[in-house]
Every structure is written in structure tokens, then in C-alpha cells.
Image (spheres, rainbow, N blue to C red):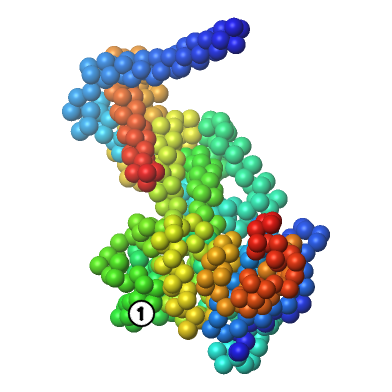
Amino acid sequence: MKLAIDTKKFSFTYPKNSSPTLKNINMPVYANQVTALIGPSGCGKSTLLRSYNRIHDVYPGNQYDGKILLYNNKGEKPENIFDYKKENELIKLRQRVGMIFQKPTPFPMSIKDNITYGLRLLGIKNKTELLDRAEIALKGSALWEEVKDRLNSSATGLSGGQQQRLCIARAVALKPEVLLFDEPTSALDPISTASIEELIIELKREITILIVTHNMQQASRISDMTGFMYLGDLVEFDKTETIFLNPKEKQTEDYITGRFG
Amino acid sequence: MSRLIINKIILILSTIAALIGITFLLWILATLTIKGYYSINWHIFTADLVNNGLRNVIIGQFILAGMATAIGVPLGMLAGIYLREYGANSKFAMIIRNFSDVMMSAPSIVIGIFVYGIFVVPFGGFNGWAGSIALSIMMIPIVVSTTDSMLSLVPQELREAGIALGASKAQVILSIVLSAAKIGLITGGLLAFARVIGETAPLLFTSANNNFLSLSLNGQYPSLTVSIYQLATFPSQTSQNLAWAGSVILTLLVLFINLTTRFIFKPRKQ
């Protein structure tokens, strides 16, 4: 299997904390697969996810140790994302590694402007090109049929599930190599959740997916690989089937059978 | 049993207090309406102060407050953006925030004296610029504070989402945060405008007053509030009626602006 990301001896410490929140994480992320991170609240799974596009850098004073290697589409030329120092290198990283948040985050502008936001940042000004790419992204996110007649109306008027698919379309429009999902369905109803899950499975043909979820059924439904985290450690990482049916570690078994967490 | 009695006493006391507050407001409005009814006529809006009208001073008051807005709102908003988006909870930002809050309760007469010292005396006389600057000094802390708190209402995820799409911090602020806080910022600006348009003390010895319509801020400048002060203390019935008329107009103006801001703010709350 091709590597998309490789996490090596990675530790992370929040500002003013004496001990690290993530301890010595070693975890591969394979290309065109869905990798799920599960574990009880406070185990560090979101912290780990937020390290892959260095969104932590919005707040100063964090400490990264170890390496996160980002491979290109062919699984070659790994680059350590912590070598990026300049702002434009970070911007490039975030264009390659997109992110979807727990709560939908539509910007206060029209649906069309939301989708083309990232593209316009790239300097694309041609209106037909922007519209074409918006259409492709919306079709790819199963939202086109619902919004094609109101592309110019405000995105905040959409339902929660539609807003979340809009955010996915907005990220997909940039043609990222990796998409990070931070509990993307925890604020949504079951029907919207199902449509997002379908979408994630659809997207993995083109994009490598990493998802943090509280919902173990969700992890087992959509992921190929699963990592179980506890108190800042990656306790076990394996094929999803193995994790759920035949875990090697007792802690993993206790968690997935609902004995704690 | 005593719980219930205490409960009753507190209820009665607070109701009385509320009624006293409302009584004075209604009293003011009633007095103004009665006095205004006899003193307001069309002549007031067409003649200047020199001919016992208020046209020039109303226009002058708007220009002074408008000029103050043009100076104060951009400065205050930029400072507010700095405090919330860049300074956040740093020590420096906290100090500025506290100073700004103290400034908000600075006596307006003191601000007037200060501006008299630095913009009137060195330039050889009362001028409209000094009046506008005095008003803008009153406005800045209000705008800083509303900008700061309105931006703090914008969810942090929205900023992160912008960063995650490859936007720089400045791009996130300009294209996402400000437009998410737009209604609140406009309201803040209007409230600050309403706050200064009724001010007298900062104008008394900065722009003073003018009997004629003037569009040049280089000289003494017509002002409605200063006119009310001067007319009300002048021993003539005509002057005093004019002062009442001015008071009514000013009150309606402030009321109108305040109601407008409520109207703008309300539909979004749903």
C-alpha cells in the first residue's frame, strides 16, 4: 500500500503544559484509504488530527517533536511538515491537506463564494473557471442538485447537513491529497450523517481520508484502518476488522466492547 | 414564612425602583412633547440661528458628529481588531483594553479641555476640526469595545476553517471575520454616533457655536447642543422656546438612531 503520511516518533505539547499531550506516536496513513482515530474524550485524537495540517499554529507556543512525513500522490518524496517555516509553505501544506470541522463552518457569503473561496485565494480570477470548479466540487459532494438554483444565496441558510457537505465541497475544490475530518457528523442528525459517510467512502478514490470519531459504529462502517488512542498514546493501529474483531491489546478490547470510555 | 415576606419586600422595592426610572423617562418625554408642540414650526428648519431658526446648527451638529465618525470609527475598529485578533489575551492587549474602558468613562468636559489645549490654543481659535476631534476621542473607546466584543462572538472554528483553506490571517480577518461580525460592527458605529451627537461639553470650547451656516471646519462651527445651552440661558422667551425646540429635535434624533440599531440587530437574532 502507498503511504500518504507517516507519523514518526511524534510528540506534541500545548503551550504552558509541562507534559506532552501526544507521546511518541508512530502511525502510517495509507493513500486512498479511510483511517479512523477512536478513543475516549481527551485521549488526544483531535490533537493528533490537527497536527497534520498544523492548524495548531494558529495559537502560538505549541511544541512539536518528531516527524510527520507527507508523501506526494505517487507515494514518493516525503517532506517533513515541521520543516515548513515560511507562511507560504504552510499555506501550501493546507492546500494539500484539507480539514473539515465538527461544527459546519459556512462563511457568511453566498454558496458559490464559499466553494470558490480557496480557489480565489490561489489567485484564480476567471469567472467561468471558478464556476466550473465549484460545480465539479458540488457534484462531488452530492450537493449540486440541492443548491444549483440558489448558488448566489447565503450559505448560512442551508441545513446543518447541507452546510457540512458545503464545507466538504469547499475543501474538495482545492483538490487536496488528504482530508482531515474532525468528528464531522457529531452535530448532525442520522440522515445527514449517513449522507456524509457515503460521501467519505466516495471521496477516498481520489483523496486520502483521516477521520476522528466518537462513534465506533461509524469507524467500523467507513474506515479501512483504525487507530485506538488512550491518554496520548496510540495503543493499537491495525486494519479496522482486526481492531474490532480481534484486538491485540486489552485496553482496545475494553474500549470497543464498551467497558469504559 | 419569613422567606415569603423577604421575597415580597424585594419584589415591591425593585418594582418601585423600576417605576421611578420609567417615570423620569416618561416625564422628560412628556415635557418635551408639550413644550415642543408650541415651539416647533416649519420656520425652525428653514432659518438659521441668526434668524431664530435651527437649520444651520442641526446641519452643523451632523457634520461635526459625521466628521468624528470618519475619524473615530476606523481608528477604533482597527484597535478593536488588533485587540481581538492579534493581541487576544496578551498582557499588552489587556492593558490597552483597560485603558480604553477607563477612557469610556472619562468626563467629557475634560476631553473638551484637553482638545482646547492641543487643537484650539495652538491654532489661534475655536474651530470645527477641534470639535470633531473631541467627539472622536469620546467615540474611539466605545468603538474599540464593541469591535472587541463583536469579534469575540465570531466562532473560532470559522477562523480555523479559513486558515485550513490556505488563507493568511489578514485574509481571514478581512474576508470572513469582519463580514461575520458586520451587523454588530455597524450597530456599534451607530451607537457611538448616537452617543456623541448629543454631546455638549466637548464642543463648548473647541468648536463653540456659529450663528450662520458654515461648511468650513476651520472656523467656529454651528452646533445644536451648544445652541441649546446658550439659548436656554438667554433671558428671552423666543430664545427659550427655540431651546425647547432644539431639545425635542435632539431627543427624537437620538431616539431614532437607537431604535434603528435595534431594528437592524433584531432580525438576525432569530
Q: Quadrant of residue B223?
A: top left
What amino acid does circle 1 point to? Ile
Q: Is residue B250 above or below residue B118?
A: above
Q: Is residue A84 above or below residue A162?
A: below
Q: Residues within 10 Å of mark 1 (few under 14, many from 20)?
A: some
Q: Nearer the viewer, residue A153 or B148?
A: A153
Give the side of residue B183 with respect to residue B92, left or right: left
Report the quarter where the C terminus of chain A lies: bottom right
Q: Position of residue A230 (x, y in %)?
A: 72, 63
Give the side of residue B235 with respect to residue A25, left or right: left
Residue at 52%, 10% (x, y): give it. B8
Q: Nearer the viewer, residue B203 or B252?
A: B252
Give the side of residue A247 with respect to residue A186, left or right: right
Q: Nearer the viewer, residue B42 or A56?
A: A56
Q: Position of residue B172 (x, y in %)?
A: 50, 64
Residue at 47%, 69% (x, y): give it. A197
| Residue identified by numbered label 1 | A136
Q: Residue furthest front?
A: A245
Q: Residue furthest left?
A: B42
Report the quarter where the N terminus of chain A lies: bottom right
Q: Chain of mark 1?
A: A
Q: Position of residue B29 (x, y in %)?
A: 33, 19
Q: Nearer the viewer, residue B68 or B270?
A: B270
Residue at 70%, 66% (x, y): give it. A253
Q: Position of residue A186 (x, y in %)?
A: 52, 58
Give the side of residue A104 with respect to residue A69, left or right: left
Q: Is residue A52 visible from the viewing direction of this image?
A: no
